[in-house]
Image: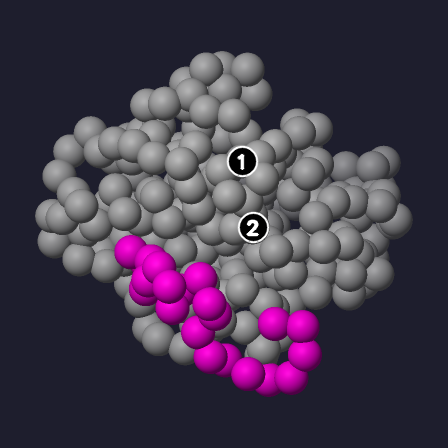
Amino acid sequence: MWTRFSRALATCVDLLLPPACLLCGQPLTSKKPFCSTCLAGMMPLGPAHCPCCAQPYPTGSSNHLCGTCLRRPPAFSVVHAARIYQGVTKEAILRLKYRNQLTLAKPLGQFLGQTVIQGREAFLPHCIVPVPLHPRRLRKRGYNQACEIARPLARQLEVPLDIRLLQRIRHTPPQQELPAASRRSNLRNAFTLTSSAAELSILLVDDVMTTGETVRECSRTLRAGGATEVQVAVFGRA
């Protein structure tokens, strides 16, 4: 009875408010969140990238370690990046992050889940940990975009989401406002753990990765707290 009513209600809603692309508003003929044009504009990570931090290379199909990972081996073992941070992907992340378009979090998280599942190495973490915001910034924004992306990802992987383990204790200027040389020192000792991470394998989630200093510092903190392995999942990789 309830199932029939729900289906009838959904049909009425679709007739009155036909589905539209979450980004461009183009009417959709299916229940996909984006139109074919916007989907085509979300460029996946190509074969030419660092096998550790997923930094894209401009040409070819090389998969050697980048200079940064060679000079400063990170505490994480690999980065799963769903899309290149440009064009439609960049627009989607900016809308989620700064324009309160929270409806984007579910499809972005699901796309990221597909990327993790299709990763070269099977990885089933004990928990999923989103990169935290400082409480002051969280109060101002009202939500943590990394956490919102991590929720559907956690459901897809059937892995617990832990939003308390990793906390940000220093309020620092946004990374994108700083030159690359200052980003590392800006985050030094900015994170802490509320409990031990001993013997845990962890999937750390963020919306975008540019220089990588944020996930590097978060991973360092998790490994220092006893985590056996940290892998990173980001929707956009610059």
- The N terminus is located in which quarter? top right
Question: Which numbered disc covers residue 210?
Answer: 2
Start-end of magenta stretch: 57-77
**Horizontal arrangement in the rendering, residue 179 relative to residue 38 (left or right):** left
As drawn, the residue found furthest toward the bottom would be 61
Where, quadrant-wise, is the C terminus in this rendering?
A: bottom right
Q: Give me the residue at 57% from left, 20% from top.
A: 141
Res 26 label: none
For mark 1, what is the residue?
Answer: 175
Q: Is residue 59 magenta?
A: yes
Placement of 214 over or under 132, stated as above or below: below
Residue type beneath disc 2: Thr
Q: Secondary structure at mark 1?
A: helix
Asked whether 144 or 71 is in front, the reply is: 71
Residue 154 highlighted magenta (yes or no): no
- Asked if labels 1 and 2 touch by Cβ distance under 8 angstroms, the answer is yes
> Sequence-wise, which precedes: disc 2 or disc 1?
1
